[in-house]
Each structure stands twice: as C-alpha cells, then as structure tokens.
Amino acid sequence: MDSKTDTLLRLLPKKKLKEADREDQPAEFSGHLRLFTIVLALVTALLLAFVLLPRVPVMNKGTVATRDVIAAYTFYVEYPGPDQTIISYRVNKDELIVSAGKRVSERAARIMEEMVRREGIGNRLYAYFGLTLLLLLLFYVFYRDIKRYQPAFFQEPRKLFLLAFLFLGTMVISQSSKFILTHVADTFGIDPATIAFALPVAAGAMLVSLLFDFHLALGFSFLVSVTMGLLFPGDPFMPIYFFLGSLTAALSVIQCKKRTAVLRAGFLTGLVSMLAIAAIDLYRGEIMTRGLYDASAGFLGAFAVAMLVSVSLPFFESTFDIATDIKLLELLDPNQPLLKELVYKSPGTYHHSIVIGNLAEAAAEAIGENPLLARVGAYYHDVGKVRKPEYFIENQRPSENKHDRLMPSMSSLIIASHVKDGVELAREYSLPSAVMDIIQQHHGTSLITYFYQKAKELQPFAKITEDDYRYQGPRPRTKVAAIVMLSDAVEAASRTLDEPTPQRIQALTNSVITRIFLDDQLSKCELTLKDLRVIAKCFNLILSGIFHHRIDYPGMGLPGDKKRSDHQDKKQPEEGKTEDEWNKEKAQNIAGKSGTA
C-alpha cells in the first residue's frame, strides 16, 4: 500500500462533530457544575468543622470514662457544694482528671464542664453544626469574590476540587503539627504558645499563588487566617500573624520561574514572620524572655513551608494538570523531546513557531495575559505537522509541492489533520491541557481558503460547501488561544509581502485581524476591540523589526540576481496604482496564499 492510499484511509473516516459538541456547553452541564460546587463546599465545611472542633470530652457524673482525661493547662474551678458552700479547685497542667474505665466523680464532671466552657463551646453536636454554618458563610463570601473576578474558574471542577483540597489540607496539616509540636514542647520545656509560630500555614497560600494566581491566594490567605484563629481562642494576634505570613508567601512566588525560587520565597516569609513575632512580643512585653524562641520557631515554620511546597508542587502539577510558570519554562527547553522532533522533521514549521512565539508573547503581555503561556502555546501549536511535514509549504522545496497531485478536498483533509495530530502528540508527551487547548483551537473553525477556492475553480458547476473546507474547531475559548490564532495568521500572511514597508505591514495586519473577526472566530473568547487594536500595534512593531530595510552591500550580489526594487511588482505604484489600491489588491490575495500555512 503506497503512502497516498494510506493517508487517504486514515483521513476518510473523519467524523464531523456536532456544533453543540464543538462549541457551546449544554445548560444541563452548567447546572451540574453549580450542584458540584454546592456539594463540594458542604463536604469541605463538614470535614473542616470536624477537624477544628475542640477535642474536649464531656462526661456526666457516674458514667464510665472511655479514655484518660488530662488537663491541657492550669486553671481554677469553682462550683456550689451540697451545703451551698463554694468549692474551689486548682487544676494543674497535665493533671489526670479521670482514668479510663473509672466512673466520673462530681469533681471530674465539674472540671470537664469548665474545660468545655473555656474552649467556648456548648453542646458538641450544636457546636459542630454551628461551626459548619460559619464556615459555609465564609465560603460564600469567597465564592462571591471569585465569581466577580474569575467567573470561568467555576467551569473547571478539577480546579475547584484542588482549591478545596488545599484549604482542607492546610488546616489538617496545621492541626496535626500543633498536636505533634505540643508534645515536643512539653518534652523540652518550651512554652506551648511558641509552637503556634512554627505552624506551616503559609504553604497553602504559596501553592494557590503558584497553581492559580495571586488574587485567589489573597482570598485564600484571609480565609485560612480567620479559620486558624479558632485553634487559638483568646489570642487576637495569631490570625494577624498567619495572614502576614500567608500573604508574604503568595507575593514572593508571583514571578517564580525556577523551582529553587521557592526556597527564596520561604526565606522572605521567614524574615517577615520574625518581624511580626518581634512586634507581638514587644506588645506583650516578652521580647527579652521568649523573643529568641518565638523568632526561631517562626523561621523554622517558614523553612517547613518552603519544603512542603517544593515537594508537593510537582505532584499537584501532574495530578491536576496545572501549567505553572515553572512548568511552562521547562517546556521551552529546546531539549524537550517533542521540540527536538519538530526541529528535525519540520525545521520550517519550527522557525515559523519561533516567530509566532515572539508575536504572541508581546501581544499577551500588552493586554495583561500570561505571556509565557502564549509563547509555549505558539511553540507547540503546529507540532501535528511532524507527521506529514512535506505537505506544508514552509517545509517544502521550491520545486516540489505534493498538493499538485491531489484533489483540493484531499489536500484540505491533510492540512486540517495537523490539528488532530497535534492534540494526539500533546497527549502522548503529557503536555498541560492549557497548551493542548491552544493546539486544538488555534485555527478554530476557519476556512481553508486556498483549497476551497481551488475546488471552486476546478469544479465550477459542482456544489462546493464551505463546511467541507473548514477546520473542526472549536473556536478559541481563551484570550491566549485567540492571540496564537491571530499571530499564526498574521505571520503566515506576512510572508506574501514583497515590499514589507511599515505601511503595508499595518494594512496586512488590520486586514487579517478583520477577516478573522468577521468570520466569527473570536466570539467565544473575551477579546475586546480595544484588545485587538493593542494586539495589532504589537504585531506591526515586531514585524517591522523582522522585515527591516537593509542596504545593498557592494559586491554581494550573485549573477542574474535583481535588486528588490527591480522587480515588476515593486513598480506598481509608479505605473498608476495608488498605495490604497495596492493594499486592497494585496489583501484580497492574502487569504488564499495563507491557506496552506
């Protein structure tokens, strides 16, 4: 079986996707997401209330104790005796109140009642549901904040689950650390209040900032700090301390480009924590007696934060398919297997992708999107061409074009297949879904104009439908994917310019962007007309730099070569055509010439 027949067999079973599958999500799906969000919040609140509820036993007089009850601190108990006299007891720290298997005495019951009162809880069942309701109210405020600034966040259940997991995990680790460090403090005679400064609470905020963004980390820090205050009743400084540490940790990793930068962020968090501890101890008048111990605990806690984040970040990146800036920078390494395959098999496509990366990165940065994601998406957007590189014009020799021996319908199938092949390669090489989406969406449902027009010319009386010559989509869903689409189209069209002056580059850019906009390819993303103007300016600036004018060096010409100004198409303005007429004619031919790109 020859290669042409093999290609035909692979492409003919191509199945058209329904428009609903390619574009809009059904209304039922949004309802399911809303239900998922509510259930996730409720389950998280119930689990968190269980973790935070004080473990103070409540036993009535005469019942048999199921375990030893020991006083966690020193306090006094007063209650009226049988003859209306006031009975007062001093309970010492670590004093055994009642032994397991023994009946609870009047004194033991009164002591446990006082312990419950000091913890600020009443009936444990009521306290549990009250704490759950309070947490749900906090979650609702956090939800409203996210809904206002990042409504698309609630369309991704995976990210919602990760955010809830990070919040619950932060509280569980903090509570467990408090329990362990309390025993360590008792062993070495350290004040139990010191261990609070060593809890790695800031790890959650740092991970949220790395995996999502700083705005989410800001709300997360506030929520965690307020909730952690429940573990330290009567100490108003602890929520402030935890909030400062979490906020510093989140700020320190905004521009994190290397995994070693997490250690630097931990060091900065430690410095801020030590300053906050010094301020708290100064206020209490204990800077000389316990300042050194507290500051040491704060710095060790920040070190634990850096270690926890360094160990867990790769796990969260791979498990939840999150493309952090660190991960994206690793994908830009030329030694990445997929990029090396692109260089060796499709060198023209690789060079084309590099130029698009420059265009997309500048445009994304100009409108406030992630420039690193734009560059990575541009580098990988055409990786599907490595399977049939010789069918794409940037990889062909000037004297050979395989499409000359194919029907336009077959050529359009081959051209469109590079999107499907790219998605398959992205899955094979475990690229993040954010990059995979750009690969899938960078052509949208645009028309393969060149072969569509060629088919109409070859079969003037046949019914040629545009749907048979369109990419399968979907259209770009994010601003970055749309930027890569615009960069791809503009870069391909710019290769048709024979005299790339700044005016002609500007006319070309405006024409391509207008054509894509009128083709309804940008209706699913959030690009505004203002964004398009800014993107066009960035494209003009970079393309003008790429096609800058050079002088003709004496003696460098080859026999038979003509200067650029000697070509017939450069003399058009001198032969009666105005600049506007030339631009109009050029714009009409751009779409056809860029169809095979």
Image (tube, grey):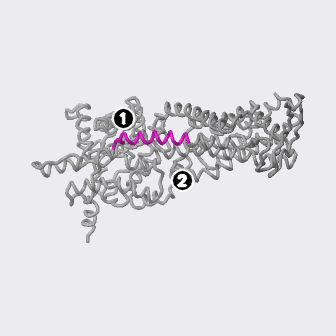
Which residue occupies the foreground of this view, 231 or 133? 133
The disc label shown at residue 276, or none: none
Q: Quadrant of residue 53?
A: top right
- Compare residues 396 and 115 and report the one nearer the observer: 115
Residue shown at 68% from the left, 34% from the top:
243
Q: Residues within 10 Å of mark 1 (few under 14, many from 20)?
A: some
Query: Is 140 or 519 nearer to us in this picture?
Result: 140
Q: Amino acid at mark 2?
A: Thr
Magenta span includes 430: no
How many marks overall? 2
Residue 452 locus on image (x, y percent): 21, 48
State left or right for residue 99 relative to residue 445: right
Q: Is residue 41 magenta?
A: yes
Find numbered disc 2 in the image and state the secondary structure of the residue it sits on. Answer: helix
x and y percentages locating residue 383 in the rendered image? 40, 55
For the residues labelled 2 and 1, the Cα–Cα distance comes to 47 Å
Q: Which residue is mark 2?
A: 319
Give the residue furthest to the left: 461
Q: Which residues are magenta?
A: 23-42
| Depth order, front residue of 175/379 | 175
